[in-house]
Structure formats: C-alpha cells, structure tokens
Image (tube, helix red, strand yellow):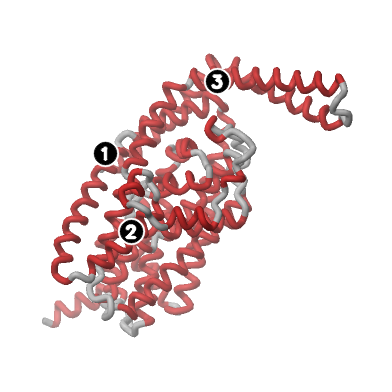
C-alpha cells in the first residue's frame, strides 16, 4: 500500500512540477531564455562568418572574435541568472541525489556478500552453479548489448541539448577516457574504506566477492556472518525506503527546474524515451522466450501461463521480490526440482536482473546523449562491462538501479545531476524492468532444471494436487 501511495505521490509531483515549471517559465525565466537563445543564435552566425574568413589577422576576423566573446558572455551571464532563479527547486533534487549516493556502497556490499556466502557446498553444487552462471551471464550480455544497440539506434537523448555543469566544461572531456591502467585502478581496491568513501563500485564488488567466498568456506561460523550481513542489508533496504519517501519532492523540484528552463517541449523526449524502452523490453522478452524454447520446446508456453500472475505482481508493485513467493510455488508446480529452484531463484535475484540491466544501459547512454558526451564503442563496451559487474550486487527492489547508475556514470564523465531527468519517469520504467526480471529468473530456473534432468516430463498442475489430496 505504501509503495502504491508513493508511486501516486510521485505522479502527482510530476504533474505539479510540469504546471509550476510552465508558469515559472512564462512568468520568470522567459526573459532570460530569450536572451540565451538570441545569444546562441548570434554565436552560430558569427561562427559561420569566422569559417568564411581566411585571413585570421584581418580586422574583420578580430571584430568577429570580439563579438563572439561578447555574446558568449551574455549567454553565460543569463544562464547563471536562470540557474539562480531555479536554485530552490534544484536543491530538492540535490538532497535526494546525495541520499541515493549515500546508500550505494553499503547496498552493493551487503547484498553481494550475502548472495555469495549463502552457497552451501561450492564443490557439490559446482556443476549446477556453472550452468546457472552460464545462463545468467549470457542473459546479462544479451540484455546489455541489446540495450546498447537500441539506445544508439533510437538516440532518445539527442534532443535534450543540456549544458554541462561548470566542472565538466571544456574541450578535454575525451582526454579523461579510461585507459587500461585507469580501469585496473577502478577494479582492484587499495583500501576497502577508501573504496566505500569514494563510492568505487567495482572495487567494492571485488572485495565483496572475496569476502563472500571466504565466508562460505569457514563452516558453521559462516551462519553468524550471513545473519549479520543479511540483517544489515535489511536495514539498508529500510533506509532506502525512507530515502524514497523524499522522491516526490525530488521529482517536483527536478521537473519544475527542467520545464522552467526548457519549456514543455522537453516532455516529448520523455514520452519517446519510455516508448523506446518498452519496445526494447519487448524484444528482450522475445529473445528470452526463444532461448527458453530451444531448451524447453513447447513447454515454454506452459511456463509463461504459470508465471503470468507472478509477473503481474512484479509489474504492479514495481519490485520482483514481491513475486518471489508466488514464483517459487509456480516453478515447483511446473515440474522443477525443489533443490534447483531453491538454488537458482535466490541467486537470480542478485545475479540475473535482465530488465534492470537493460535499463541501466538505456539510462546511462541516454544521459550521455542528453549532455552531448560522446562515448566511443570501446568506452560503451567498458561501461557495459562495468554495469555487468555492479548489477550483480543489487537486489530486485524498487528503484535500486538508480543507485548503480549513479555509481557508474561518474566514471565516464557523465554529470550525476542528469539523474534528475530520470526520477520522474522511473516508476513507469521500474514496472517493466521488474516484470522482465521475474521472467528471466523463471526461465533460468526451468532451463537449468532441464539441463540437470530435474524437470518432470509432465507439468505439475493444481488438479494433480487436488487428486492427490482426494486419494489420501
């Protein structure tokens, strides 16, 4: 009930933000917007004239340069005044973004340690684990690559034309691209506490993997560690719920500031972005179902019929964890072995979030396009590899993907302030990616059961259970 109310409040804040932003745009900011647009038009015209002048020592060239500097100063002055006018609105979203970043490191660390440490006998389940991870990482790569290809094809952020914050201004952005040495520095921690304080997500993942594997190997004492970290993880998730209570205010502030500065035209980009994202999710669903059909044959359609209610629960609540009890029952009813279900499903909720991973790709590259930050193919693949690792430590809870995006985009010089663009539409996107996560985990469980010969020939139906009860 609380989650549905939060979503309602977010939508109300979104609508109010549009209304207030439009009024503020017309009554307060319009004057400065007109001056900024006029200055930009003059600068473009001057640039065209400068290109035509071949003699850079001529008086005409020098006069044009002086005029360009003057118009650039006008643009900068009015942009500063405009930012001051919307400062009170942007503060609301800034507070939320800081709180989101506050929970990134502990959320990734605790959930990943618990997920790895809960594996009982690594040698005994090694075969099942390898098959499970094979499916998980294959699905991860497909989700990320498909997301990268489609977001580059659609380019949903190309019409935003947002100005980079002052700390990112200049022409040397491309020079800060990650080299191999820089990437290694981002992966392997020098100090765990330094990694936590700097929100170095990859370093936290590496330490968490070591910590989780070591915990799983210490025998009975591991239960103490698992219970402790599981409790800490629950506390952090509770903190997350507290932070999300501020989301409506953040949405109101972010949307008001955006509409105030850019007008209602910017909202058309959101509509396009949402439509393109759901189209991409539909393609991902088709790929997952086709891959399942290769292994399960026609029974894949029985599986879809079995899990439809669980998928709807995840879609309506925007969390795949809400569907966990139902999907557990349905997978066993489908004919999957209990030991396979109990092993694969919990791992899937930390290691196999197909919808969330596609969203992370879409969101990160959307922000890069919005700020006109060019990323080469190599840089984009590096980002996908980063997301592939960092996504493994995120639970299937509402809006947890924003935390991973926040911790990743800074590595590629994409302004973190751009996350404000996603807060308002995130609930709509969260519904689709949560439902996709449930489908991916159910398909993985069924496929691994089939590979292990632990899937009964005939599906276990409710009528079978009723007949068993009547015969007793």
Q: Nearer the viewer, mark 1 or mark 2?
A: 2
The residue sitting at the left extreme is: 472
Above or below, comparing residue 226 to residue 318 in the picture: below
| Labels 3 and 1: the sequence-earlier one | 3
Few, some or many residues within 10 Å of mark 3 (<14, 14–19, 20+) = few
What's the mark number on residue 242?
1
Above or below, comparing residue 185 to residue 128 in the picture: above
Residue 306 is left or right of residue 173, and the answer is left
| Residue drawn 35% across the image and 72% down it | 445
Residue matched to label 3: 80
Residue matched to label 2: 207
| Labels 3 and 2: the sequence-earlier one | 3
| Residue drawn 42% across the image and 47% down it | 407
Q: Compare residues 114 and 245 and report the one nearer the observer.
A: 114
Mark 3 and mark 2: span between their CA atoms?
A: 43 Å
Q: SS class of the residue under badge 1? A: helix
Residue 331 falls in which quadrant of the image? bottom left
Q: Compare residues 12 and 422 and report the one nearer the observer.
A: 422
Task: Please provide percent x and percent y for residue 218.
Answer: 19, 70
Q: Which of marks 3 and 1 is in front?
A: 3
| Residue drawn 55% across the image and 25% down it | 261
Above or below, comparing residue 186 to residue 214 in the picture: above
Mark 1 and mark 2: span between their CA atoms?
A: 27 Å
């Amino acid at each position: 009930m609380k989650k549905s109310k939060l979503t309602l409040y977010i939508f109300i804040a979104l609508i109010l933000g549009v209304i207030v932003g439009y009024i503020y745009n017309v009554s307060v900011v319009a004057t400065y917007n007109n001056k900024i647009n006029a200055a930009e038009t003059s600068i473009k015209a001057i640039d065209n004239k400068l290109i035509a002048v071949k003699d850079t020592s001529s008086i005409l060239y020098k006069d044009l340069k002086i005029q360009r500097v003057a118009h650039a100063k006008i643009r900068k002055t009015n942009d500063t005044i405009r930012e001051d006018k919307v400062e009170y609105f942007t503060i609301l979203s800034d507070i939320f973004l800081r709180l989101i970043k506050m929970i990134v490191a502990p959320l990734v660390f605790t959930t990943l340690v618990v997920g790895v440490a809960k594996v009982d006998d690594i040698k005994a389940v090694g075969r099942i684990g390898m098959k499970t991870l094979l499916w998980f990482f294959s699905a991860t790569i497909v989700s990320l690559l498909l997301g990268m290809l489609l977001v580059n094809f659609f380019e949903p952020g190309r019409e935003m034309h947002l100005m980079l914050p002052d700390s990112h201004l200049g022409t040397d952005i491309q020079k800060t691209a990650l080299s191999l040495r820089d990437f290694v520095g981002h992966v392997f921690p020098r100090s765990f506490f330094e990694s936590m304080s700097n929100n170095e997500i990859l370093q936290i993942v590496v330490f968490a993997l070591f910590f989780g594997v070591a915990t799983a190997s210490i025998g009975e004492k591991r239960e103490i560690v698992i219970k402790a970290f599981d409790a800490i993880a629950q506390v952090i998730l509770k903190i997350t719920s507290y932070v999300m209570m501020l989301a409506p205010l953040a949405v109101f502030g972010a949307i008001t500031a955006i509409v105030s500065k850019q007008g209602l035209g910017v909202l058309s980009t959101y509509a396009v972005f949402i439509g393109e994202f759901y189209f991409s999710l539909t393609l991902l669903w088709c790929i997952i179902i086709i891959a399942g059909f290769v292994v399960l044959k026609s029974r894949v359609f029985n599986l879809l019929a079995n899990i439809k209610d669980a998928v709807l629960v995840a879609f309506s609540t925007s969390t795949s964890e809400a569907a966990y009890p139902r999907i557990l029952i349905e997978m066993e009813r489908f004919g999957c072995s209990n030991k396979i279900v109990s092993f694969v499903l919990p791992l899937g909720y930390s290691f196999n979030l197909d919808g969330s991973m596609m969203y992370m790709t879409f969101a990160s590259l959307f922000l890069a396009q919005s700020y006109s930050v060019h990323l080469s193919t190599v840089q984009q693949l590096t980002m996908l590899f980063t997301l592939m690792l960092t996504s493994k430590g995120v639970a299937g809870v509402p809006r947890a993907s924003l935390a991973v995006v926040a911790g990743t985009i800074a590595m590629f010089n994409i302004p973190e302030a751009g996350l404000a663009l996603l807060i308002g539409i995130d609930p709509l996107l969260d519904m689709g990616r949560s439902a996709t996560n449930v489908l991916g985990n159910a398909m993985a469980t069924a496929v691994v059961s089939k590979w292990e010969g632990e899937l009964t020939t005939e599906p276990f139906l409710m009528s079978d259970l009723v007949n068993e009860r009547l015969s007793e």
